[in-house]
Image (spheres, rainbow, N blue to C red):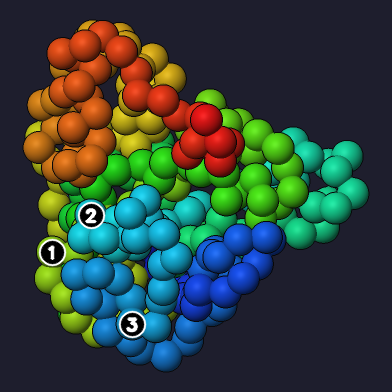
């Protein structure tokens, strides 16, 4: 069970006026040890606390490998051609060898003194479109399930980039993050997928509420503002 994954970088950012909006999407590498609380890394900020951050979205991890995909996808876009590299997605943790196909909902990792648990996929939003100046990047990211994932902090403590993420627990019949993305985003009204998500006790409350609403109403919540910034 105990598998170790070493991080490439960890990142923190401050809220600033960038890309025509207030955001902390531009983050910077941190090489020293720092404290991870239940709300996230010391020194890391969040501009929109109603949609980002919080106890179940304390950390965002994004696979380093995905940048090659985006670079190839948008190879003809002169503005972004040479810039597809971390930390372009606002991630806190950058890694190689951990992807949506290998990481599962509810996976618990020992990281230094802290213990963190995977709570949900990252829900792509319009701020990525503004960051990269690509209309619909958020939609594309959601469609191909290259979203990264979020953590809740089970045990706070000191952490650093030199300390690995060590998998210490995986729930029975765990869904991979890719499977969660396919069920939640790809086939949002597929009853079988929704029922499977309903059984995931470690899914974040915010996503679980939407799963239950869909099962009750057979309707999908409006994604327009999240993905595009307008209704």
**Whole-percent x, y for residue 196 in the image:** 18, 20
**Whole-percent x, y for residue 229 in the image:** 56, 41
Contact flag, marks 1 and 3 (Cβ < 8 Å): no
Which residue appears at 26% of the width and 77% of the height? 36
Nearer to me, 47 or 93: 47
How many numbered tags mark residues here?
3
Question: Which label is found at residue 154?
Answer: 1
Label 1: element kind:
strand
Choose top left, top right, bottom left or bottom right for residue 88. bottom right
Choose top left, top right, bottom left or bottom right for residue 93. bottom left
Which residue appears at 67% of the width and 60% of the height? 20
**Whole-percent x, y for residue 225 in the image:** 49, 36
Query: In the shown orientation, is residue 136 left or right of residue 22?
Result: right
Nearer to me, 176 or 141: 141
Q: Residues within 10 Å of mark 3 (few under 14, many from 20)?
A: some
Which residue appears at 29% of the width and 43% of the height? 120
Q: How crowded is mark 2: few (under 14 residues within 10 Å), some or many (20 or more)?
A: many
Real-space Cα separation, disc 1 to disc 3, in angstroms: 16 Å
Query: In the shown orientation, is residue 223 left or right of residue 27?
Result: left
Residue topped by disc 3: 42
Choose top left, top right, bottom left or bottom right for residue 89. bottom right
Residue topped by disc 2: 56
User: In the rendered structure, which disc, 1 or 3, sits on the residue that comes first in sequence?
Assistant: 3
User: In the rendered structure, which disc, 3 or 2, sits on the residue that comes first in sequence?
Assistant: 3
Real-space Cα separation, disc 1 to disc 2, in angstroms: 10 Å
């Amino acid at each position: 069970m105990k598998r170790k994954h070493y991080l490439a970088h960890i990142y923190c950012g401050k809220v600033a006026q960038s890309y025509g909006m207030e955001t902390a999407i531009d983050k910077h590498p941190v090489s020293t040890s720092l404290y991870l609380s239940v709300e996230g890394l010391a020194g890391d900020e969040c501009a929109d606390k109603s949609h980002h951050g919080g106890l179940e979205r304390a950390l965002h991890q994004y696979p380093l490998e995905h940048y090659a995909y985006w670079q190839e996808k948008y190879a003809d876009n002169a503005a972004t051609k040479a810039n597809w590299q971390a930390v372009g997605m606002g991630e806190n943790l950058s890694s190689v060898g951990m992807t949506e196909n290998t990481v599962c909902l509810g996976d618990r990792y020992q990281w230094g003194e802290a213990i963190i648990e995977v709570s949900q996929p990252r829900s792509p939003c319009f701020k990525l479109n503004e960051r990269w100046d690509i209309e619909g990047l958020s939609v594309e990211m959601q469609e191909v399930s290259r979203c990264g994932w979020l953590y809740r902090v089970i045990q706070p403590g000191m952490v650093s980039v030199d300390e690995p993420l060590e998998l210490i627990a995986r729930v029975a019949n765990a869904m991979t993050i890719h499977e969660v993305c396919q069920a939640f985003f790809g086939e949002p009204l597929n009853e079988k997928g929704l029922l499977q998500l309903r059984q995931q006790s470690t899914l974040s409350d915010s996503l679980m509420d939407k799963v239950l609403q869909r099962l009750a109403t057979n309707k999908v919540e409006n994604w327009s503002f999240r993905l595009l910034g307008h209704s």
